[in-house]
Amino acid sequence: MARRRLAVTIKHVAADAGVSLQTVSRVINDEPNVRPEMRERVKASIDRLGYVPSIAAQRMSGSRSYLILALNDRERTIADWRARQGTDWVDQMLLGGMLECAEHGYRLIFELVDTHADHLARELGAALSALQPDGAILTPPHSDNPHILAILARHHVPYARIGAQDDKHGGTADGIRVSMDDEGAARLATRHLLDLGHRRIGFISGPEEYRLAGRRVDGWRAEMADAGAASDGLLQAGDFSYASGFRAAQALLAPIDRPTAIIASNDQMALATIEAARERSLDIPYDLSLVSFDNTPLVRFTTPPLTAVDQPIAETTATAVRLLIQSQRDPAALPGPVVIPMGLVERASTAPPVHAA
Amino acid sequence: MARRRLAVTIKHVAADAGVSLQTVSRVINDEPNVRPEMRERVKASIDRLGYVPSIAAQRMSGSRSYLILALNDRERTIADWRARQGTDWVDQMLLGGMLECAEHGYRLIFELVDTHADHLARELGAALSALQPDGAILTPPHSDNPHILAILARHHVPYARIGAQDDKHGGTADGIRVSMDDEGAARLATRHLLDLGHRRIGFISGPEEYRLAGRRVDGWRAEMADAGAASDGLLQAGDFSYASGFRAAQALLAPIDRPTAIIASNDQMALATIEAARERSLDIPYDLSLVSFDNTPLVRFTTPPLTAVDQPIAETTATAVRLLIQSQRDPAALPGPVVIPMGLVERASTAPPVHAA
DNA sequence: GTGAAAGCGCTAACAT
DNA sequence: ATGTTAGCGCTTTCAC
């Protein structure tokens, strides 16, 4: 069976326009040294023939692949998908990432990567060798994984690290860094509750391997301190799971001098806090105010709908893509760490404490 | 700046194993005419060097690209992402599609395609020329779009149509077809309500351009007829939007002889029905039973949680991928239309009617 | 069963 | 400002 190559190639365009391959290539890549009239002629041929460069061929000859890899944690992502809890992290990433890529003629490819070290080098290496992307976007917890950074570096793939905290090599700019202002957001949430009149504000933290979890704790503690409110005994450790959130909420709500408000550092743990409050017949928001983190879709459908810190995932991903592409064009100017502000969406789960105001 | 090609290529493997390029190629592609011992030797070299074939090069020389495109409607998908209502169609597609692809050494690339005819040919053509995928998965409403099918055919890209109803060219097997059993599911939902003792069961339909919407209506009507229950005046047209669902529910609930149960053909319209019932002080499930379609995450968080028909999107997508890949291996045997059964998840929104049982 | 040669579509380096 | 040449990594003939 003869392979029918119906695809129009650069040759057809060259013939049609009566120029050399090279001139067509120059036009495609917006390179100099082509007279305007030639350029127009070639463009006309391209349009007429409906020519589109083959990414494979472009990549083969050492040029760009116009592919950007979005690397996410396999285990966690699949678990989220299976759980069907409405977590839309992936969707928001695609929304921000794909649209921004399209803007620049790139394409975003979503890829799952195992954290487990054995597979890691093989798996990620395979993806990089096979696809040869022009860049990669790392999400937590990969953003701070030195193994992954090393593999990327070995393959000369530039990367943007979302939510990465520090440079690994003391001061050396290690990839592009784009973070959400988790600390500021925690302050914002805490301030909101303080303003309502709360003084005893509990906090349920996330797991330590997520650096952003620590930053959220820092923000809460700092804002409490600034207000002269004690935070001792008001911190409970969770791991972002419902079960851990439930235990943490129970621990916070058990004492007589229980907090009048709780900040949960993600939505699942906030959900668990609602349940823990219900068990003790505490009414939200009157007996207990609750602020959640992340603002995933489900918090609009809980009873009551939750006041929540909003994670601007789409905007953050778009920014990462933009900086990555810009830095290819001008490899000199790597931008410093960029911080995207987070917002607070007030809903019905926060109110003044009963005995205050 | 010298381009440092650190990647290990087929040459390195050939040299390392002391064989020709061709033999390595045969091993990679599991082709015959290689002695077992040679094969082992080459495999050992591949492992040692961590060699991975470059997709670009493979594609260049006329072989597979190991890429499968998942085509979704741009406007609708972006709107869903922006709305953040917890619709996880895309996630479930990725779950089923990516994992099944990985199983066979393929990769799934998620792509948005405009329905608007002008752009369509350019856009989709560009994606196909650039990526040269080995196959495409079409989702509604693209599955039945003759324009898209034609462009795919012109580029010789085999496709699987999810939720496509009929062959376009009367009997000619037009691509692979995988559908969910919408009619059966509607019957299932209706039967569930009939079994509870309901006789007046209202139905809120979806827009006509989605063929599955029509099939859901058919199933409801057929099951009602089988039970000897009248369906006249119990059908209201919606378009899958909240607003349309609200209007439809209002129309259904206004008459004195209002239905004791309603089936909404998607979750947004079910949500709207909850609100419409609340406005008339109708308690769900006691005054009104409600069954939803799709089982997106949000229906677990409503009050009450909704009994819903579950769309097995992941399984359907996985099946489409599997059939697509199989049919490349053995182009002879294109399977007939495959139907994936849907299930009913019972939650708290359905109960016997007050004046029955 | 194995290898050598040609070529896929494109761009970098080097002419002109 | 434009054309020519070589080669990217791989698979497909076609020899042996």
Image (cartoon, coloured by chain):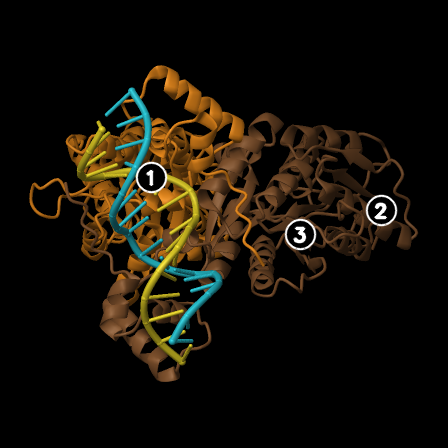
Chain colours: A orange, B brown, C yellow, D cyan
**Disc 1 from disc 2: Cα separation:** 51 Å
Chain under callout 2: B
Rendered view: B243 above or below B356: above
Give, as a three-letter code, the residue at label 1: Ala
- Horizontally, residue A315 falls left or right of residue A172, namely right
Q: Residue at x 62, y 37 (%)?
A: B268
**Disc 3 from disc 2: Cα separation:** 30 Å
- The local secondary structure at tag 3 comes to loop
Which quadrant of the figure has residue B107? bottom left
Give, as a three-letter code, the residue at label 2: Arg
Q: Nearer the viewer, residue A43 or A38?
A: A38
Q: Which residue is mark 3?
A: B175
Q: Which residue is mark 1?
A: A261
Q: Residue A338 in the image: x percent, y percent?
A: 22, 32
Q: Residue B189 in the image: x percent, y percent?
A: 74, 52
Tags 3 and 2 touching, CB below 8 Å: no
How packed mark 2 is, by other alpha carbons closer than 10 Å (few <14, some 14-19, many 20 or more), is many
Q: Residue B28 in the image: x percent, y percent?
A: 39, 68
Q: Residue B121 in the image: x percent, y percent?
A: 57, 32
Q: Earlier in the sequence, mark 3 or mark 2?
A: 3
Q: Nearer the viewer, residue B138 or B267?
A: B138
- Horizontally, residue B350 falls left or right of residue A328, namely right
How packed mark 1 is, by other alpha carbons closer than 10 Å (few <14, some 14-19, many 20 or more), is many
Tags 1 and 2 touching, CB below 8 Å: no
Chain under callout 1: A
Give, as a three-letter code, the residue at label 3: Gly
Residue A241 shows up from this direction: no
- The local secondary structure at tag 2 comes to helix
Quarter placement of the N terminus of chain A: bottom right
Q: Which residue is mark 2?
A: B221
- The local secondary structure at tag 1 comes to strand
**Disc 1 from disc 3: Cα separation:** 58 Å
